[in-house]
Image (tube, rainbow, N blue to C red):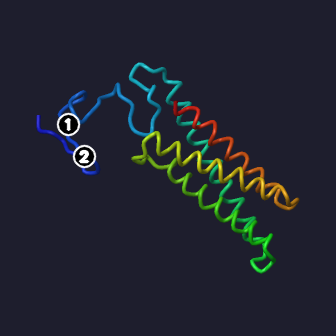
Amino acid sequence: MAPCVNPSTGTGRNRAGAPGNPGFGAAGRGYPPRVTSTTSQKQPVQFLEDRFACAQACTECARACALRASLWDPDGGEEQEVLRRRGILCAEVCDATCHVLAEQNQLDETALRVQLEWTRAVCLECAHVFDRHSDAEKAAQACRDCARACTEFMGTLG
């Protein structure tokens, strides 16, 4: 049997379990290390549901923050500039995290955890800034929901 070469990684394999191919029993990158061929079907399904819920919360937060940032006057003074910049930063970070979670990418668990922790920190900081303004309640709540979803998803990573 001729070896197959994965063009993205350059690694080859002959059959499941051969060098370069861990087979069905090993965890893939971006998946919890506990997922094996003998894992119950509920664990991988729960992992994917939590991943999707986190991506969805990030999308909602990005939308809310971008909208909120667009409503503040760029010439409205220092306070409004801080609010606008926080909203834009949060929207960009959440958008990037959503893309990472939505794609089957090559991030390992450590890189995914760093992305999620960064998103959680930015969201909580943005929610704190938005809490000072009564017209930003929905955006602040979206930020807190995203931070919570990131925390919950990190719990499934092991």
Q: Judge from the rendering whether residue 137 lies leftward or rightward of residue 10; answer left or right.
A: right
Of residues 41 and 5, which is closer to you in this image?
5
Q: CA distance from mark 1 to mark 2?
A: 9 Å
Could you tell me which residue is drawn at 74 percent across and 77 percent down? Answer: 74
Whichever of callouts 1 and 2 sits on the residue coming sooner in the sequence is: 2
Tag 1: residue type? Arg
Q: Is residue 46 above or below residue 138?
A: above
User: Dot 1: few (<14), some (14–19), or many (≥20) neighbours within 10 Å?
Assistant: some
Could you tell me which residue is drawn at 65 percent across and 54 percent down? Answer: 122
Q: Quadrant of residue 21?
A: top left
Q: Residue furthest right?
A: 134
Residue receiving disc 2: 6
Residue receiving disc 1: 13
Q: Position of residue 107 (x, y in %)?
A: 43, 46
Q: Position of residue 83 (x, y in %)?
A: 76, 66
Q: Is residue 51 above or below residue 32?
A: below
Secondary structure at numbered mark 1: strand
